[in-house]
Amino acid sequence: MAAPRTKQQTLAWLRTLSGELATATLKRLDETLPWYGDMPPGRRSAVGLVAQAGITSFISWYDDPKSTPWIAADVFGAAPRELLRSVSLQQTLQLIRVTVEVVEDRIKGADESLREAILLYSREIAFAAADVYARAAEQRGLWDARLEALVVDSILSGEYDNELPSRIAALGWNGHGEVCVLVGTAPKQLDVDQLRRTARHLDADVLIGVQGSRLVLVIGRASPVQHETEAEVIPFLEIATRLEPGFGPGHLVLGPEVPSLVDASKSARAALAGFAVARSWRNAPRPTLADDLLPERALAGDPLARSTLINRVFKPLQAHSTELLTTLWCYLDNGRSLEATARELFVHPNTVRYRLKRISEVIGWDATGAREALILQTALIIGSIAEPDAQRRRG
């Protein structure tokens, strides 16, 4: 019976086998792992380098087990960075298993301590692989967060450049079509994952940005809207209501719906302007539509609010009928009294009711409601101020 090898003899024997083991490992990979055979030649070569480095590192580790902390650098340092994106952690563990099996098959009948060393090393290399992938995921998460913050900042400022679409694509944005911006107070502990889960359940996608004490969400639909299923589409206000628990205390303002992410800055400007003045509406709901804060925004000097009031209230009524415009003026000036308005206009109260109904159909706001009456009266005042003197004299 042959005398057992010394450790130095075993090391010398392993070093002579390293090339043979690497070749056998690559052959076994090609035979047992379909994903390896489907890889481009460059990446197959990189995977082969990892396998070969693993065998070489094992021999060094067997010589000095205290070198464990360097395993990740020894084995995975030979791989290009993009390999982490093309080879999953599960595939890496399969690679480790195949390599260990090849080495075990080759050293059958050798010293039992060598087999135990292989098992211990395979455990260490598996943990090292998990650590490499965890670090890569953490770095990618930090990069994604910075990129997302940059995209949200660009939307809020309206400063677009040619790189914005590629940045949005890099974030995996799944939004299609209409977009709204939701602005509120950031909570002490922001749960980004919960906000994303809630959005996904509502068939929506979100971009999240924190600016000081403000939390900003850009909300888009995660699937294109089909005309035949529009009745089933969840309104943005309902989506905002479901996302509301993820915000801190205080007001929550939803900007108007815009056609696409490229137009999101308009919704953002309205939402930010509304958030700045929301405290002036004592009974403001949570969330509040930015367009429901048009009077406060206009008084605060928001040019977008002023143009919205003129273009959505004053001009449509003026273009439709001066009769409707005059009736609305009289109705609001008379404290929303049908009888007083009818007396001033020398018409029947039912005529006033009919005209108010027509006004609601034309502009979408009902003058009989207290809040909407404030919006309409502000629109009339701003519209009349902006109207040229010549048109006023003709009127």
Image (tube, rainbow, N blue to C red):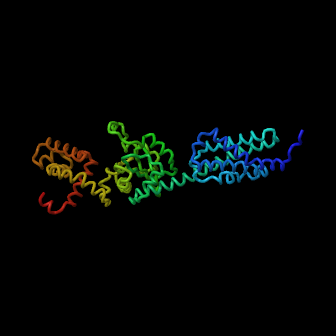
Query: Residue at position x 27%, y 51% from top?
Result: 375
Furthest residue to the left?
346
| Front-lying residue, 146 or 124 | 124
* 182 vs 225, nearest the viewer: 225
Q: Is residue 346 above or below residue 32?
A: below
The N terminus: image quadrant: top right
Placement of 283 over or under 105, stated as above or below: below
Along the line of sight, the residue nearer the viewer: 5 or 166: 5
In the figure, is residue 74 to the left or right of 114?
left
Q: Position of residue 242 (x, y in %)?
A: 42, 42
Q: Quadrant of the C terminus?
A: bottom left
Which residue shows up at 19% across the image and 60% down it?
Answer: 387
Determine which quarter of the picture holds residue 277: bottom left
> Looking at the picture, how far across and down is residue 263, in whole percent?
36, 53
* Residue 56 visible to an observer of this rendering: yes
Asked whether the viewer can see residue 253, the reply is no
Q: Residue furthest bottom?
A: 389
Residue 284: x %, y % from top left = 36, 49
Count of all numbered marks drawn on residues in the image: 0
Q: Residue at x 59, y 45 (%)?
A: 88
Residue 323 vs residue 37: left or right? Answer: left
- Relative horizontal placement of residue 111, taking residue 241 as reference (left or right): right
Q: Is 71 left or right of 375, judged from the image as shown?
A: right
Q: Quadrant of residue 157?
A: bottom left
Residue 228 on image: x %, y %: 32, 36
